[in-house]
Amino acid sequence: MLMTAANSQKYSRSLPLLRSGVAQKDSPQALMGAAMRFARNAEIYGEDEPAEYLYQAISGAVRTYRMLDDGRRQICGFYLPGDIFGVEAGEVHLSSAEALNDAEVLVVKRSSLMARAEREKDFAAQLWALTVRELQRVQEHSLVLIKSAEERVAGFLLEMSGRSCRDAVIELPMSRRDIADYLGLTIETVSRTFTQFVQSGIITLETSRRIQLRDEAVLNRLNA
Amino acid sequence: MLMTAANSQKYSRSLPLLRSGVAQKDSPQALMGAAMRFARNAEIYGEDEPAEYLYQAISGAVRTYRMLDDGRRQICGFYLPGDIFGVEAGEVHLSSAEALNDAEVLVVKRSSLMARAEREKDFAAQLWALTVRELQRVQEHSLVLIKSAEERVAGFLLEMSGRSCRDAVIELPMSRRDIADYLGLTIETVSRTFTQFVQSGIITLETSRRIQLRDEAVLNRLNA
DNA sequence: CGCTGAATTGACGGACATCAAGATGTGTGG
DNA sequence: CCACACATCTTGATGTCCGTCAATTCAGCG
């Protein structure tokens, strides 16, 4: 099967796809990934814009989201260094992307990806695998949204812990509002659940964005 | 762009992909799609099974779902004749699939799809586009799960109306339980919302599974 | 130090779940 | 064709989780 290597990895992290594409400077048609800088809260792309590029976070973090016309915001995903985003798009983007904090993002023209995919079938397969993995990530996220607040927050902490540092201390790049909009809760409920976890001894808050996991077993149990 | 034609279609319906694959019997390596019959509630594939096949509903209808270990069930999607399902899988299926009612399903080996994709780059692009479209469908579904019960049910009716018959009368192939598990609600809430719509004159229930849309404008407004 | 936005905490209400009963429909066997 | 059983759907009464509104605390920064 063509996507073996890809699936053994967690979600869309550390994808050799674009990385190798950039490294490979010998080929005349090599991928021209341009590194761009985005300030905190700057828009990387917007809903309904034509989807000309694919993106890979280099440093910093990114959120993608969609707005409901009554102002509610649903965050589709967070992307950390190494993660690729913008895959969700056909002709136009269905979501917007913004930098969570000052971020460096590699931007690659879709047309060049497509061109390379036509030449190298392995590359085409990788593009496909990438999309499948993103699909699975979103599926997983859907599952979260039917759970209780406690379960959602527990799952979120585990997700964040599993990514970034493999440390028991997580440095959250996003605000409570971002977390709330990701989990389909309010900031108050997120906050209350955090303090509830603190009181249960499951976590400790070094700062509001610096969280130490004290009892991962309980978190896993709460994750349902 | 390679996926123009695909994106102009609604979701994953009426995909020429497998259809043409089956029709094409001349090629020695032609796709060998086997039509299989499944009885009501029969399992088509199960979670964690190796994903050897791709599926297309011919007649009847199909649900895919995932179970949470406390017994809750989240229905990922409903698939009507023409729809392709099983795309969500990497090495193994993340969801299970069952026939909603007696159904005929075209089953195609992944390996033969991959083989053809290697030979025909258009075909590879179509496979990719198919996955992107499924990704968008799931994204859309995530959005539903943060809305109110009224909005979810309204959205569901519009979705169902948009598929199947382009008629104002919808024949639902699924039970209230299925609808509830799809929308992340309880059967009681779904039922109550239906009767509320009836009392508002938005719909009429010819039978519990036969619904006539009387005021699609209001439904669209409720859909937020 | 005071200003500002973010996070926390509290009081309260509402939307939906839960529990329970009744109504409707459907298949089966006499 | 009827009668009975069983599943599905509807309706009602009650509870609860989480959203809303409001006040307070906390953290960063000129």
Image: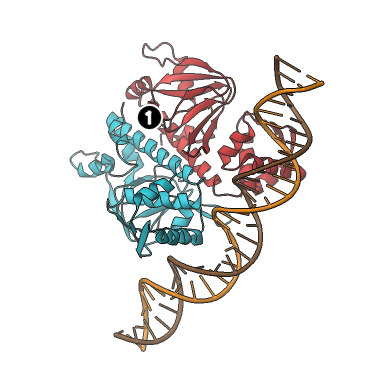
Chain colours: A red, B cyan, C orange, D brown
Count neighbours of disc 1 (C-alpha within 10 A) and say few if under 14, some if 14 to 19, many if 20 or more.
some
Image quarter (top left, top right, bottom left or bottom right) of the N terminus of chain A: top left
Residue at the location (48% across, 43% down)? B142
Q: How many marks?
A: 1
Of residues B213 and A121, the one drawn nearer to the viewer in this rendering: B213
Of residues A159 and C3, the one drawn nearer to the viewer in this rendering: C3
Quadrant of the image occupied by residue A39: top right
Quadrant of the image occupied by residue A204: top right
Chain identity of mark 1: A
- Does residue B191 appear to the left or right of B167 in the view shown? right
Spot occupied by residue A62 in the image (x, y as percentages of width and height): 54, 27
Of residues B132 and B166, the one drawn nearer to the viewer in this rendering: B166
Say whether residue A102 is visible: yes
Residue at the location (42% across, 51% down)? B154
Amino acid beneath label 1: Val
Residue at the location (46% across, 58% down)? B193
Spot occupied by residue B120 in the image (x, y as percentages of width and height): 27, 31
Residue at the location (28% across, 47% down)? B33
- Does residue B79 appear to the left or right of A206 in the view shown? left
Spot occupied by residue B129 in the image (x, y as percentages of width and height): 34, 34
Say whether residue B46 is visible: no
Residue marked by disc 1 = A92
Task: Tell me the element at label 1.
Answer: loop
Spot occupied by residue A144 in the image (x, y as percentages of width and height): 55, 45
| Residue B97 to residue B7: above or below | below
- Does residue B161 appear to the left or right of A19 in the view shown? left
